[in-house]
Amino acid sequence: MPFKIVRNDITKVKADVIVNTANPNPVCVSGTDLAIYEAAGKEQLLAERAGIGKIARGDIAVTGAYNLKAKYIIHTVGPVWTDGKHHEFEILENCYLKSLQKAMELECASIAFPLISTGVYGFPKDKALQIAVSVFSQFLTGHEIEIILVVFDKKSFQLSGQIVGDIDSYIDANYVWESHRKEYSVWSRGSAGLMDLSEEAFYEEILQRGAEDNYPFEENESLEESCMLSANIPLEDQLANIGVSFHDKLFELIDKAHLDNKDVWKRANLDRKHFSKIQCDKNYHPKKKTVMALCIALQLDLEQSKDLLARADWAFSPSSKVDLIVQKAIIDKQYDIMQLNVTLFKYTNETLGV
């Protein structure tokens, strides 16, 4: 089962288990804790919770879900952030891991988490997110369960400054290039160095050239797409030697990488049924995001990824943030699908795989 991120109220999410960021004592005061109690049925849930008593930080307890769209509520008490030197990271990891282990023990197929301890307990959101994804990633390598990370609003979903800076720069550079390409469909002489300029210098250069260049634009031959067909070979002969299909190429790449099918669908954040459909149907036409997820799972380079996409009748778009972020991950050889999905969700509300 895969991992997904949704933007929603956790009390409205359908899952076998809803995880509650609980108070150590059987009371509900504010935040996610109060919202879950009120949605489930406050009096009934408080009565059962009172029978459990105090819960230690990093530990869990299970109750019924009552009016929620779930079978169980797992109550877990996260750490209060001080400075990161008082076992906060270890305690938060335990909250996630023990909840997952209990869900498996209860034979549940799905579990929904909020970002634990990032509210009144003050755990830095970027660090909390990193811990959650790390625990989920490790757990899913050995277990089959759908993990849903529920984000109520974008303010609670933060990436590290390094990741944000790198992605913003990459997207901005490509968007500037694409905007200029659309406005000037062919390039003037001497424009080869434009992409090396900063955005501000780029536009200054364009303004100057607009005043100085009175000659027609000339097309840069290096930007032309090479034709797939050859004028010297009859069409019938070329169609008789058509290239390998998406299906055959995919499983050729899997064999070459010496991977089991299970490794591939887990790395691609696909569920087993979906991958089985791809495997069994030679004419299956996958969605673009499914192909990109498989490129990540197989750790393909950019040219290999473009080739696999093309065999499924897709291509990377320079005007799509999803495509640009996936391309950057491939260029940087960052093939962790869960980390990539966290970044994608931050910028686009979309993820790969499921």
Image (spheres, rainbow, N blue to C red):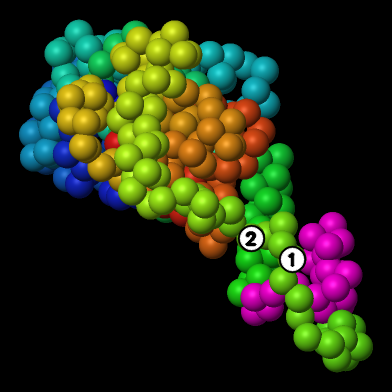
Quadrant housing residue 151:
top left
Would residue 103 be seen by someone viewing this image from the given angle? yes
Task: Residue at 58% x, 14% y: name it.
Answer: 87
Q: Position of residue 3 (x, y in %)?
A: 34, 30
Of 217 and 22, the residue lying toward us: 217
Secondary element type, mark 2:
loop
Secondary element type, mark 1:
loop
Left or right for 155, reference 165: left
Type of amino acid under label 2: Glu
Task: Residue at 63% x, 60% y: name it.
Answer: 224
Of 273 and 217, the residue lying toward us: 217
Placement of the C terminus among the 4 image quadrants: top left
Magenta residue span:
183-206
Is 184 one of the magenta-colored residues?
yes
Of 148 and 285, the residue lying toward us: 285
> Do the residues bearing badges 2 and 1 touch, measured as CB atoms within 8 Å?
yes
Task: Residue at 71% x, 40% y: name it.
Answer: 162
Q: Is residue 274 above or below residue 6?
A: above
Q: Which residue is mark 1?
A: 220
Type of amino acid under label 1: Asn
Q: Position of residue 40 (x, y in %)?
A: 14, 39
Would residue 157 be seen by someone viewing this image from the given angle? no
Q: Position of residue 101 (x, y in %)?
A: 29, 11
Instruction: State the mark number for residue 224.
Output: 2
Quadrant housing residue 241:
top left
**Crowdedness near tag 1: few (<14), some (14–19) or many (≥20) residues, C-alpha within 10 Å:** few
